[in-house]
Image: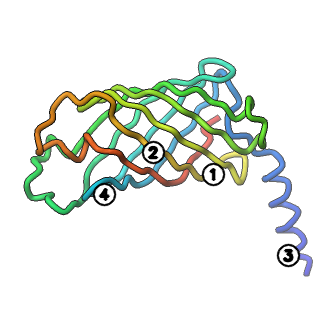
Amino acid sequence: MKKILTIALFSAFCLANAQAFKGKGDTKLNIGMTIQNGGTGILASTDFGLGENFSVGVLGSYLLGGSQIQDVPAEYRFDVKARFNANLGSVLNVSPKFDVYPGLNLSLKNFGGHLGARYFFSDGFGIFTEISTPFAKYDNDAVSKYNNSTAFNIGATFNLD
């Protein structure tokens, strides 16, 4: 019983101190998987807080498999994106552990936008989900269709501060 009570109190303490976006100087790391039309992959992204409600970052993704993966050369399986986010968690005032961030991204394959959300269980660990879609494609060729379609991302997020 003492162990259960200790774990419950520790968990409550961690949850009470979690904060999704702190503003300037805040750094987040997202690691997860991406699911898109006919393909799946892995991704890693990081965001650096520059102000109270905005951040910039970078995202890298790599296609691991897909319905037509054999037709996709290796150079088309990788993509890098520069990102700009408007962190609205403090504006919406839902919870300090929750952040919603719409944003724009400029990649090697396209220019697009994304809408994401983060929820932190403790000061350093949480989950994220994100949907991104291209607005302008640099290459409408079928070879790069995986990087030029709407993608759904999900995974773990870490506070690096």
Distance from disc 1 to disc 4, alpha carbons, whole Å, reads 22 Å
Amino acid under disc 1 = Gly
Q: Which residue position is annotated with label 3?
A: 4
Q: Which residue: 13% across, 46% down?
A: 74
Q: Residues within 10 Å of mark 1 (few under 14, many from 20)?
A: many
Distance from disc 2 to disc 4, alpha carbons, whole Å, reads 14 Å
Residue 86 position within the rendered picture, expressed as x and y whole percent measured from the top left: 58, 26
Q: Which residue position is annotated with label 4?
A: 40
Residue 158 position within the rendered picture, expressed as x and y whole percent measured from the top left: 59, 45
Q: Residues within 10 Å of mark 4 (few under 14, many from 20)?
A: some
Which callout, 3 or 1, points at the residue further toward the start of the chain?
Answer: 3
Check residue 126 in the rendering and tell me which mark sits there, or answer none: 1
Amino acid under disc 3 = Ile
Distance from disc 1 to disc 2, alpha carbons, whole Å, reads 17 Å
Which callout, 3 or 2, points at the residue further toward the start of the chain?
Answer: 3
Q: Which residue: 42% across, 32% down?
A: 113
| Mark whose residue sits in front, 2 or 4 | 2
Q: Which residue position is annotated with label 2?
A: 131
Cβ atoms under marks 4 and 3 closer than 8 Å? no
